[in-house]
């Protein structure tokens, strides 16, 4: 059940959310769109292809101090902020839903997540999108509120108590609209049978596609950084000259790096880029599925859009699909 | 007793030393060590046996060549400071050119009086215990190394490409814009100031461990001329491994 909202009333919704939350929304920067803190609704891009970095930038920041030693005194640094994402695409909202499966008992993640509001919005799928293949094109309760495009205007759906609070206010129309299912439907450029392919990865472990693609891969780590579901991190201890002042930092890592699978004593489980490149897929489409029932990919297409070497994850996956 | 520290400079711009003075922890550093020899930072300097000597700059004259050997003899640890000491720096572009022509252009009739050796990076002349890379170095890197030394830890190498610094800031990719950028093969940890300011990475910190050079060059050849690629890798770290070959025209 949804309620109608006129486009011109979105500003009032945004302003009301801003009163309670630090609002993060897509804005245009040069040729690209980025997620940033926005104070003025006129800056929000309601219609955008994709942002360079996903919401992860704010939920699991690149470098996050988790505790500090201050004059020898231990201080845990639990984040204290109320973030609202405004106008996230369905895939990005569902990515947060899948991150929840992993970080359900992580105190730093949960401190932000519990207070968070997510307002999703309809998108116009672009050439690199494959959210249908990953099952991330369907509205879930990862969104507190979803704004489905309805001509020039929108129909709002609340999925949680937090979202309902905003849906019931003055700017939504009184009558309810009966919509059974909210999903993003379109013809994907390449549809993939993700679950079958995921099973094939281990069966066809030495498929030549790994070697062929790794030859073109720069190991620049861009795909893993822009991925809304690549959450691997490293933990670094820093001291500030004197030994009783310092901090422990959680920092993004990437399995494409040689250092990622290096262990004490210098042994490395994935010395070849081929093995590291394959690891992205084994994790996303096989082991993550085994553990959580869904792939750790929402088909947002960022890894395709932002790969400098023009590597298309869908092509790699499609070569594993046979048999 | 406080550790005895020296900071020497050879042929350079002194920018790395300025980065040290810029440290917000300079008071803590001054409180923890005795600067026995630091020409840029203090008036009175002397020779002694040093616990740590930082050396900035490239070796261009035979006088400097003797100096670095002397520094090594007097120091428990020698740390190369910045791209000039680590990889020859900008001055070593001359290694690829006709130096006599260059000297004549700059010094005219006095050219013959100017000595200019083939520039070798410091690790090719003396044993270097650690390198703090960059043109200039990042103050944070200096602080990190000093903190590690104080704590008795071996400083760790960065293992991430500049792309990681760059993309973590949400920057658009220079390569995707068709600009030749060394980011994917360049040693990171700098915070990607160049791409953040809209310029490509020149790889001033030299190559990353396990750089995908073949893939990088294949990609660069599609968007840049051979000359541009050579110039890119011959700019700030011309004598670094791998970069030396590309800068020398091996594409």
Image: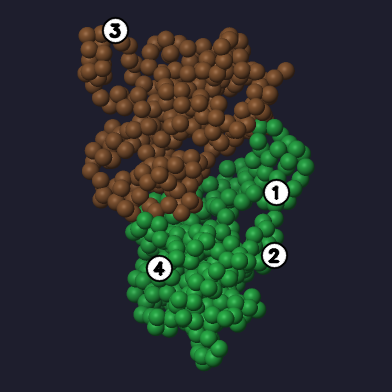
- The answer as to whether the residues below labels 3 and 4 share one chain is no
Q: CA distance from mark 1 to mark 2?
A: 17 Å
User: Which chain does the residue under circle 4 lie in?
Assistant: A
Q: Position of residue B224 (x, y in %)?
A: 25, 46
Residue at the (65%, 23%) spot, across then down: B30
Q: CA distance from mark 2 to mark 3?
A: 71 Å
Q: Which chain is green?
A: A
Residue under label 1, please give it: A67
User: Which chain does the residue under circle 2 lie in?
Assistant: A
Q: Nearer the viewer, mark 4 or mark 1?
A: 4
Q: How many marks?
A: 4
Residue under label 2, please give it: A105
Residue under label 4, please give it: A48
Q: Which chain is brown?
A: B
User: Which chain does the residue under circle 1 lie in?
Assistant: A
Q: CA distance from mark 4 to mark 1?
A: 37 Å
Question: Which structural element holds mark 1?
Answer: strand
- The answer as to whether the residues below labels 3 and 1 share one chain is no
Residue under label 3, please give it: B113
Pointer 4 or 2: first along the chain: 4
Pointer 1 or 2: first along the chain: 1
Left or right: where does residue B109 sit relative to residue A78? left
The part of the image, by quadrant, that contains residue A207 is bottom left
Label 4 Cα crowd, 10 Å radius (few <14 / some 14-19 / many 20+): many
């Amino acid at each position: 059940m949804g309620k109608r909202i006129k486009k011109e009333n979105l500003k009032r919704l945004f302003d009301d959310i801003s009163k309670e939350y630090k609002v993060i929304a897509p804005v245009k920067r040069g040729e690209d769109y980025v997620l940033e803190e926005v104070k003025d609704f006129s800056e929000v891009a309601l219609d955008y292809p994709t942002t360079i970095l996903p919401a992860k930038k704010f939920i699991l920041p690149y470098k996050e101090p988790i505790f500090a030693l201050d004059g020898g005194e231990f201080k845990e640094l639990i984040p204290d902020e109320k973030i609202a994402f405004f106008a996230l695409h369905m895939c990005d909202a569902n990515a947060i839903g899948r991150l929840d499966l992993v970080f359900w008992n992580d105190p730093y993640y949960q401190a932000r997540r519990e207070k968070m509001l997510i307002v999703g919005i309809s998108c116009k799928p672009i050439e690199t999108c494959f959210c249908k293949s990953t099952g991330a094109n369907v509205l879930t309760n990862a969104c507190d509120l979803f704004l489905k495009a309805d001509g020039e205007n929108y129909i709002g759906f609340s999925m949680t108590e937090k979202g309902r609070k905003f849906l019931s206010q003055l700017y939504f129309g009184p009558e309810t609209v009966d919509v059974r299912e909210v999903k993003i439907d379109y013809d994907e450029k390449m549809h993939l049978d993700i679950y079958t392919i995921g099973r094939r990865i281990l069966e066809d472990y030495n498929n030549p596609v790994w070697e062929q693609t790794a030859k073109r891969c720069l190991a620049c780590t861009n795909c893993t950084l822009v991925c809304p579901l690549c959450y691997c991190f490293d933990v670094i201890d820093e001291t500030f000259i004197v030994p009783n002042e310092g901090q422990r930092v959680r920092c993004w890592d990437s399995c494409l790096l040689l250092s990622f699978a290096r262990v004490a004593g210098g042994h490395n489980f994935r010395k070849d880029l081929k093995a590291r490149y394959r690891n992205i897929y084994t994790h996303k489409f096989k082991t993550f599925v085994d553990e959580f029932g869904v792939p750790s990919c929402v088909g947002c297409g960022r890894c395709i859009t932002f790969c400098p070497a023009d590597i298309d994850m869908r092509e790699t996956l499609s070569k594993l699909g046979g048999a | 007793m406080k550790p005895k520290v020296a900071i020497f400079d050879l042929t350079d711009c002194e920018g790395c030393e300025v980065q040290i003075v810029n440290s917000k922890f300079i008071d803590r550093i001054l409180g923890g060590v005795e600067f026995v020899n630091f020409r840029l930072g203090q008036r009175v300097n002397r020779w002694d046996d040093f616990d740590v000597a930082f050396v900035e700059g490239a070796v261009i004259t035979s006088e400097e060549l003797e100096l670095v050997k002397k520094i090594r003899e007097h120091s428990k640890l020698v740390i190369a400071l910045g791209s000039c000491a680590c990889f020859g720096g900008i001055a070593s572009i001359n290694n690829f050119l006709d130096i006599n022509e260059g000297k004549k252009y700059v010094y005219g009739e006095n050219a013959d009086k100017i000595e200019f050796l083939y520039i070798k990076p410091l690790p090719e002349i003396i044993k270097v215990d650690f390198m703090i890379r960059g043109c200039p170095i990042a103050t944070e890197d200096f602080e990190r190394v000093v903190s590690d030394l104080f704590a008795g830890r071996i400083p760790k190498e960065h293992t991430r490409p500049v792309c990681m610094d760059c993309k973590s800031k949400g920057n658009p990719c220079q390569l995707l814009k068709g600009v030749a950028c060394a980011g994917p093969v360049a040693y990171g940890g700098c915070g990607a100031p160049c791409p953040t300011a809209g310029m490509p990475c020149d790889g001033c910190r030299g190559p990353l461990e396990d750089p995908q050079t073949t893939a990088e060059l294949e990609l660069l050849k599609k968007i840049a001329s051979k000359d541009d690629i050579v110039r890119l890798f011959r700019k700030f770290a011309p004598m670094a491994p791998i970069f030396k070959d590309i800068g020398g025209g091996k594409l």
